[in-house]
Image: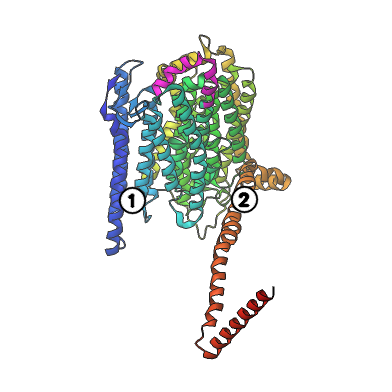
Amino acid sequence: MQSANFLWWIPGLPLLGSIVAGILHFVELRARKRSPGDRTYGATAAWCAVAAVGAAFVLGLIGFGALLEVGETGTLTSASWRWIDTGGFDVNVGMVLDRLSSVMVLVVTGVGFLIHVYAVGYMKGDPGYAKFFAYLNLFVAMMLLLVLSDSLPGLFVGWEGVGLCSYLLIGFWYEKGFPAEAAQKAFVVNRIGDACFLLGMFVLAGLFGSLDIATIDAGVRGVLADPERQGQLALAALLLFGGACGKSAQIPLFVWLPDAMAGPTPVSALIHAATMVTAGVYMVVRMNPLFAACPNVLYFIGTIGALTALVAGSTALVQRDLKKVLAYSTISQLGFMFLALGCGAWATAIFHLVTHAFFKALLFLGAGSVIHGMHEEQDMHRMGGLRKHMPRTFITFVAGAAALSGLPLLSGFFSKDEILAHAFADGGPYLLLWGVGIATAAMTAYYSWRMVALTFFGQERFDVATVEPHESPAVMTVPLMVLAVLAVVGGALGLPAVFHVQNLLGDWLAPVLAEGNELLFGAAPPHMSPATEWVLLGLGAALALAFAHKGFHDYRDGTAADARFASERPAAARFLGGAWGVDKAYATWIVQPVKLLAFLIAVVIDQFAIDGLVNGAGAGARRLGMRVRRLADGSIATYGLWMGSVTALLAFLWMWMGVR
């Protein structure tokens, strides 16, 4: 363990960049009052934000180099400060860089830097240019805090921070209406998962008397020795996974992610590729001894992951919106990562997280380049033939689609195959999950090349008189080229054993994952023969090639296949288009009853019952007062009449009482 206080600067620099960009935004607002066309401060804010993330990436490389020198089990730690001190329970906040967090830091800052550069061109001319980069830098800062924190409360601050930033960025164009609704949906759904995360922390605090991650990981064996506390350990793991379902969009909390496409495209790339949605995967891997001690919970995680991959992958088959296809694809690929976690393949989940960051960031930014060149058109049915108008975007987008679909020797092929191989090797009930994964991988290849064919091939289906497609500027296409290279060669980080080369990422992460592997597998982890591995590799390659070919040729000439499917199987088309009716079920059974209950409380109980009673009492007193007021009209005749009437009444009562 080596002291390294520069770790605070890794999230600190993007945070500082966010503050500077925010100040420049307000300065620009004042400058525009004098000169409405002034955009100087916005450009300065954008490049300050880019520089901040770039500097954080450099610090991440320095930390990575330092880890190479301190040995396999060495870590870099910063000075910590006491946050909560209750006497018997303390929470300290510090930064720790080990082999796992170093990978995440490089992915977040490296891919985040490319997205920031791309956003300089994509968001140019937007009235909120500086504000956008303030939010984007804050997003990166919170994600870095999440992956570097040495305690669950510190991790949770970053966890909530990325949730807040997602709300701000998804709803960035709130004046359009729908983005604001999408931001609210993301915020509410994530709060459900966050509540589970908090409850899980409470259970862990009771079990271990600490929320320090290293203390919890080291104390799992001691808890396992006490049968009475094993149930609490499983409960804590389930609750933490509930939090991961919200952040990483797993069933049943995945419904916010497709609507998050309402935000600007760089936001979609940052959320879906390198930051927020990977937080749940990272958290499970970081707490791998806890989850390894609960095999039943792990199988549940794998089942949820496989089902999520299947539901989202099948839904992507029928989407027309280019970004919606990629959104459901992200959910599906996250499902693959959780399938890997359910198999105890921690390093494999991180491997797919890394390769997914490369090719999915590329695809989202490529989609943004298409949308930019098509004057904000997102419907693939209104595209076609764009490869001759956007050659650089076309080539890089095809590289991303090839990696996503798992074509042989590309990054997605190796990472996805390794997940399926682990599920197959675990055998037993995991074979069913392997079958679901195989089917979903075939769907992935099909919809990836359907997307390429509808967008770049066939006849031009847009109005050539009003739309003039054009290539994006270099500030947008250069990041695409860098990501395309990474998407193609990224598989070299985790080549399978049958290739007889070093598994770079797996070996790098092995010391961090050793405790979890020993708790789960003991001395005999699942193993396959080389022949079986080659067969599975061949099967994966054949499926990817076959379904990629079919998806491309079904749609290269236009949208006829979609029209035919909708007319021949309308029920299936509606079912898949509506994501298996999950969102509709929420609207029917949760949203509408809650709205009805709110109406009953607000109108029937509050306005009619409570307000009606109070207002009725006031109105009655007023009417009574008005009637009494008429008695004092200043007329001597009226006063005499009332005095005589009262005198007669008293006389009558006196006589009546006297007679009795």
Magenta portion: prevailing SS class: helix
Q: Position of residue 492 (x, y in %)?
A: 44, 23
Amino acid type at circle 2 is: Gln
Q: How far separated are the C-alphas under marks 1 and 2?
A: 39 Å
**Model colouring:** rainbow
Q: Position of residue 612 (x, y in %)?
A: 58, 63
Residue 592's label in the rendered image is 2
Establish if 168 lies above or below 196.
below
The residue positioned 52% from the left and 16% from the top of the image is: 520
The magenta stretch spans which residues? 213-235
Dot 1 or dot 2, earlier in sequence: 1
- Residue 66 appears in which quarter of the rendering? top left
- Tell me residue 316's x, y (percent): 59, 40
Count of numbered labels shown in the rendering: 2
Asked where in the image residue 36 lies, by quadrant, the reply is bottom left
Magenta stretch holds residue 367: no
* Residue placed under numbered mark 1 in the picture: 130
Q: Nearer the viewer, residue 472 or 35?
A: 35
Q: Considering depth in this image, is 155 or 102 the residue closer to the camera?
A: 155
Amino acid at circle 1: Ala
The local secondary structure at tag 1 comes to: helix
**Residue 549 in sight here:** yes
Q: Are marks 1 and 2 in contact (CB under 8 Å)?
A: no
Q: Which quadrant, please, contains the N terminus?
A: top left
**Residue in the image at 52% along x and 89% along y:** 635
Residue 572 vs residue 379: left or right?
Answer: right
Residue 281 in sight? no
Q: Residue at x 64, y 47 (%)?
A: 588
The C terminus is located in which quarter? bottom right
